[in-house]
Image (cartoon, coloured by chain):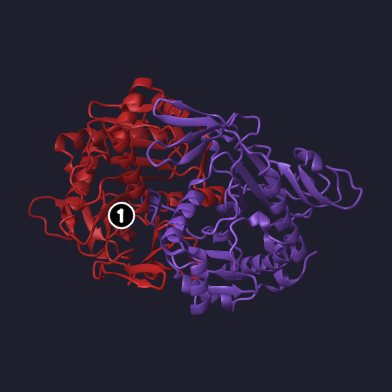
Chain colours: A purple, B red
Amino acid sequence: MPDLRKDPIVGRWVIVAENRAKRPHEFESRPHRRRGALCPFCEGHEGNTPDEILAYREPDSPPNREGWRVRVVPNKFPALEIAGSPNKGCDGIYDRMEGFGTHEVIIESPRHVVSTSDLSESQVREVLWVYRDRLVDLKQDRRLVYGMIFKNVGEAAGASIEHVHSQLIATPIVPVNVREEMTGSLDFYHGRGRCVYCDMIQQELAHEKRIVLDTPSFVALCPFAGRFPFETWILPKLHASHYENIRKNEVEELSALLRQVIGKIETALDRPAYNYFIHTAPFDTQELGHYHWHIEIMPSLTKAAGFEWGSGVYINTVAPEASAEIMRSVNMTAKDQHDTH
Amino acid sequence: MPDLRKDPIVGRWVIVAENRAKRPHEFESRPHRRRGALCPFCEGHEGNTPDEILAYREPDSPPNREGWRVRVVPNKFPALEIAGSPNKGCDGIYDRMEGFGTHEVIIESPRHVVSTSDLSESQVREVLWVYRDRLVDLKQDRRLVYGMIFKNVGEAAGASIEHVHSQLIATPIVPVNVREEMTGSLDFYHGRGRCVYCDMIQQELAHEKRIVLDTPSFVALCPFAGRFPFETWILPKLHASHYENIRKNEVEELSALLRQVIGKIETALDRPAYNYFIHTAPFDTQELGHYHWHIEIMPSLTKAAGFEWGSGVYINTVAPEASAEIMRSVNMTAKDQHDTH
């Protein structure tokens, strides 16, 4: 059973999950480049994963068989386990709890492709909708307070399997990065009565220089204080705190935009490794005036080193304006523009 | 001139330093493995670095020539520049300032070795003392409020030059990670009237299971909520908030301990890449009852991926007790134990 432990100084929770451990000399792992017969996520190998939690399938196709378009399964090596107890305890000055939670894998295509840009718009649409479905389902469990959706593509971004997928870890605590955004945006809201994200969007749309793409309901921009070259955020223009309240027509627009932004990053940087994640409000909140859900996309170009680990201050060697300008000027490659499905 | 920018939501400062930029396709750099005639840090090539700020040298040897044991020079590609202005300004909702500060390199040996464990104890002693000397000097400049000392060894830890060295970046702001430790430990101090680090040391020494090494004045331990396998902290047992107030006899003990801990990590993990950094109180504070300086050492075994970037929650696949047990059981290799100088 994994263990959730809280640092007594800064209050940062850490998951100690030895079931995911490698022996000391096995830390350098490369993603499984297994295709076809060997890839556990390819269509036809449904038996190589745990039983599916949810799948969008052809009518009448049985679960855990062929015929699916998007498939959600438990992670075989989960960081957290639903069998745990969410009760908190202490060990002297330390707070700890059993590693209670869920860890799911969203397999985004039956075909062995790698990146969101390899999917068709309609596939991305179904992926974004399955995120919503899983959050709606998981928040029924009152012991869980947060669902973090994230994606790793490429070895440098921490992917351990090549086949296009994303993950969802639901936790009984609010992750520190979200807690800080909640606190910071609440301070701003108390001080000025407005959402800081809405203010940011308004200022960025007026100045234009950090805008990557601007659609009726969404904006993609390189944030003013971005930590990484080509870091890009996608935000809904209309204030909304919870991703899972997204509407069908918004998902349509967002899927095209997300696919386009990733395509631009891949064209500009020759298909780098990348991560994205969704920051949304905790499960145990109603619509919030101060918080604004968004997606953060980060190509893995530079490594965090001693200064970044020690300080939390990042050195960005490409000004966000320059990143945005490059991304505005490149289009997706012909391959990426072609609807592959 | 670099730019210091503050994220309007969480208050995180970022350095935008385009002078350190690489063109988009040049992000994958490997550390310079240049030895001898080509390494700018080797003795005899003092002309390949900017003029030295400080050096411990043989009597009567002129600056920027041979004859030094430890040498401090400005970084050729500084993240921050002392020519900037520390005045803060705004750009709509954003806070920014010129990238004012200093960025120094501490060259730890005239010989082309790589790791702290390749140095003799007396060399490590001089390195630790030069850290102290530089902090004492830099805090005279009232425009600077923090000096972050850190080390990158190996490509995976972000090192761009192989020759053994550390760095010091002094900033006009308190880095967010230190600010969080200051705030968290102050809360604890207000609540219980004690230093949380002192409490932690006391509990760890009583339980023993996470102790790596225990010397009269210092303790090396794997923290209860460590983020990474083999993450190790070194703390003075006697409460002290400012590293630069360390005494000569303490530096003697600390240098032996630091070299031994790194040697143990290198023996257990086959010389991995690693980082270390010193967390000490800001320049503009007197001795503080709530803050406790320490060194954090982190081997680069796993990559931060989407979950860690998104949540700030780390998944540690080796329990700190297991890391400590392994480190207690291994000794430095024969090579490392041999005093190479």
> Residue B225, percent across and down?
44, 35
The residue located at (18%, 40%) in the rendering is B246
At x 50% / y 61%, what residue is drawn?
B28
In which quarter of the view is residue B21 placed? bottom left
The residue lying toward the viewer, choosing from A129 and B236, is A129
**Element type at mark 1:** loop
Q: Is residue A324 visible?
A: yes
Image side of residue B315 versus residue B284, left or right: right
Q: Residues within 10 Å of mark 1 (few under 14, many from 20)?
A: many
**Residue on which disc 1 sits:** B174
With A194 as the anchor, is A235 left or right in this view? right
Query: What percent of the width, then of the height, locates residue A237?
Result: 59, 69
Res. A163 in view:
no
Furthest-left residue in this view: B60
Between A232 and B278, the one nearer to me in the picture: A232
Looking at the rendered image, the quarter that the C terminus of chain B falls into is top left
Q: Position of residue B45 (x, y in %)?
A: 25, 60
User: What subunit carries mark 1?
Assistant: B
Tell me the kind of residue under disc 1.
Val
